[in-house]
Image: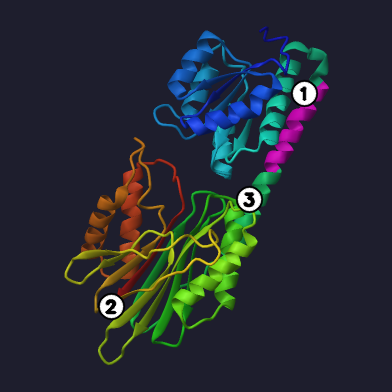
Amino acid sequence: MSQNQIDPKKADILIVDDIAANLNVLCQALEPEGYNVIAAPSGEVALKIATQTPPDLILLDIMMPGIDGFGACRRLKAEPTTADVPVIFITAKDETQSIIDGFKVGGVDYITKPFRHEEVRARVRTHLTIKQLRDGLQHANDELEKAYSQLEADNERKTEELQTARVIQQGFLPDKAPEVSFLEIAPFQQPATEVSGDYYDFFPDGDDKLLVAIGDATGHGVGPSLMVSATKMALRTVDDPSLEKRIGQINTHLKAINRSHRLNMALTLVELSHDETSGAISVQAAGGGMPPLIIRRSDGRVEEIMVKGLPLGALDGEKYGLTEFRLEKEDVLILMSDGLPERLNHKGEMYGDTRLVTAIQNASRMSQNALEIVDALVKFGDDWSNGTPQNDDVTLVVLKVK
């Protein structure tokens, strides 16, 4: 098809994603519109197809093994035959930095997963029209400028909204860890996007009891941040002395507002009660969907305590059990989201549980207090990533028995 005479209804569209299900969804969205859709399962395959037969438009996934979306776009823009093909990035992360990085390497727009057919079609139509105007209709420069201005205004608005949401969400977290006589407490959170889906909080009850909450909402962006807000409100209002009943009531509350069935909240509540006479700490935990609690005993042993249950908001009436154990002097209890164990390096390899356990052993040996343990674990994760951007929020709460 002539690059100067694109029929938006009969254009060649190349979609690139390493997940077959995503390719199928995009094909289902675009083929009924009359487009000729070509699917490529990797950046390497996409480059071969595009350089041999340049398409009219490319939908390009960012996170792929091998050549990722940013690398593929750079190479497309460096080739004269594909330099002018508009690239719309596909991303699971509704976050400012990925969007900015996509524009820097030559992308013209982005769509986020999960896909909405009408949005996909609308954005494809817009950019095919813009390309037709740019390539073949010089007299339509005013309309072209207006279209780009609208896109820029939309992107600026989204950026401002995400930044505002981030400021609001930071208010959900405690200003500082509480001071209790029997524990050193060190929390840490590093979002992967402008708005985090992770959550932690503390609820002291006098000087001998402390409730700690840690959670991870499904996905990234503004939607999960609303689940975090609802969870915090529920924790403030639900006050059943039975920990498993309290979790059940919060689940009912979140299920009632989760009408789309697309958002869940993995959450663990941990209640620590100090016996001043013996110095021991009795621990109860309830919840579901979170990584195991990790204990580094004073003698160096590392234990994983699984708190079993479904993420909250998934199933109404779900029954949650109670997990109980004890901590002694110098024991370290670590609560975390899955951001650290699932962190990726530049080769796409996951940090994993084995490296995490080793890191906890090393951090506890080298560090004297809870804050130093947090700093050491964060450094281990950063060193592993080797500069690779975070693929998920990282949240840690380290509790060390005095």
Circle 1 SS class: helix
> Mark 2 — residue?
326
Q: CA distance from mark 2 to mark 1?
A: 67 Å
Q: Residues within 10 Å of mark 2 (few under 14, many from 20)?
A: few
Query: Which residue is outermost to the top?
Result: 2
Circle 2 SS class: strand
Query: Which residue is outermost to the bottom?
Result: 277
Report x, y in % for residue 310.
46, 60
Is residue 49 placed above or below 383 in the rendered structure?
Answer: above
> Mark 3 — residue?
162
Query: Which residue is outermost to the left?
Result: 299
Quadrant of residue 238 in the image?
bottom right
Q: Are marks 2 and 1 in contact (CB under 8 Å)?
A: no
Report x, y in % for residue 104.
57, 31
Q: CA distance from mark 2 to mark 3?
A: 42 Å
Q: Residues within 10 Å of mark 3 (few under 14, many from 20)?
A: many
